Amino acid sequence: MNYHVLTLFPEMIEQGLGTSILGRAQKSGRITLDAVNIRDYSEDKHMRVDDYPYGGGAGMVMQAEPVYRAYQAVEQKIGHKPRVIYLTPQGRLFDQTMVEELAMEEDLVFLCGHYEGIDERVLEEVVTDYVSIGDYVLTGGELAAMVMIDAISRFVPGVLGSEESAQFESLQDNLLEYPHYSRPEIWRGRAVPEVLLSGDHKKIEAWRREQSVARTKERRPDLMEKQYTVTAAYFSPTEGTKRAAEMLAGELSQTPKYIELTRRRIRRQHVKFGSHDLLIAAAPVYGGQLPGVEGLFENLHGENTPCIVMAAYGNRHYDDTLAQMAKILTQQGFICIGGIAPIIPHIYSDKLGTGRPDGEDAKIFRQFALKIRRRLEDHDFTPAELPGNPSPEPKPMKGAPKFWDGTKCTHCQTCALKCPVGAIDADTMQIREDLCIHCMRCAKVCPAEARSYDASQVKAYLEGNYMARREVECFL
Ligand code: 9D3
């Protein structure tokens, strides 16, 4: 991470960030800090950078040109237009979501004001973000920039030791931290809570969570308003969609819940969601559509519950799937505030979507999750604009020819039990073609490898036309 601070007091920045963890991070090159003295870019022979305000009034205003030239020097040095943060009491309140979002940038420019402020015209020209660090009055933007740099640096890889990695901490779930205890076991008559001595890690974890919630209700009731329970409900016969849904859920909560809609019994259970829930509804794309599973999301009920729809596909296209899902979930009381179409391994070709979602995809998931988190915190439930036809003509799917080898089959009935649509007769091992969705789960789960399929034709077609890597698409 490269920080560039435009300021009239560069030594304040250098001094403030030169010691301790950030000093070490600069020495190791994990972060760089370039404090640019705006005064060096004055066009005036007396090095002036301020003047009287037009229209009168108290104090002085920082002039546009020196600020602009200092900015240009940075832009030229890094070779692209960076995000420029103007520290101002009139900005958006700095919070942890903003920290994590800004930590994904390569370069950040901070513009610190002094006096009454900066000429509005240069702000219009260069500033991308207006940020305040809290509702109190400082003497200038420098300390605010330092606060931001400190918080952001904790998310730069290698700045913190692995012990204290920033990814795993309290503020991520918008809850306060639980209380900590160390030796002695009894201090001045006060004992350590017994559960912590029990050695039962499940119980300890539950207790800590409880303490966190109680403490947040007590001390920061405003944070409770930002609480969301994240539940991912996925239909995933061959686990590709499951993995993508888990990756996104993990970016949205430390403690997501899951509903395995792949299982018939689970699909039949009614689940109600409220206004402090977030549902991730995930399904694979079959021929550009939602698989023909009766009542796939039918028993999930929202009450203006925010929802993200995920259509996971094998690198061909998601076509109408997101729109179809949004239509169904909207009917069920959800508000689809986002949509995402990740690429997963194709069931008919080991060359399409191999290894996806990968590290590149993870970055896009994180960016999308941060935008969703921001929307939830702002209670902004604007429905997403999703591409596709919400009610396409159902496409009859033929699927690849399937085979059953009676000499290998041990009649263990795993395939029949695990068939997501109940298309396999457990006694005869026959597949009912009217129910089968050609998901290939039966072949995947058979322990004796008695079930197989010949996808060579469709595989050749796919590999001939859809090998080019597609990128995850996100909709808000
Ligand atoms: C004295 C001028 N004030 C008019 C009532 C406005 C004003 C301008 C500039 C007040 C303070 C400042 C200096 N503060 C910052 O530049 C600043 C700041 C802050 O004061 N509080 C919280 N966050 C920030 S970010 C930058």
Image (cartoon, helix red, strand yellow):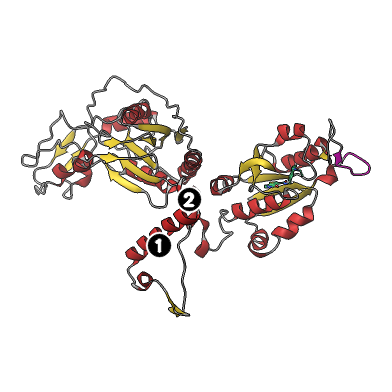
x%, y% of residue 300?
Answer: 28, 37
Residue at 44% over, 29% down? 383
Residue 49 located within the stretch drawn in magenta: yes
Kindly state the secondary structure of the residue where label 2 is placed: helix
Numbered mark located on residue 208 in the image? 1
The magenta region covers: 43-51
Q: Give the residue number, with chain letter if any, for mark 2.
A: 221
Q: Amino acid at mark 2?
A: Pro
Dot placed on the residue nearer the N-terminal end, 1 or 2: 1
Residue 372 located within the stretch drawn in magenta: no
Q: Is residue 95 visible?
A: yes
Does 310 sit above or below residue 255? Answer: above
Q: Amino acid at mark 1?
A: Arg
Residue 344 quadrant: top left
Cβ of disc 1 within 8 Å of ligand 1?
A: no
Q: Nearer the viewer, residue 152 or 460?
A: 152
Q: Is residue 87 visible?
A: no
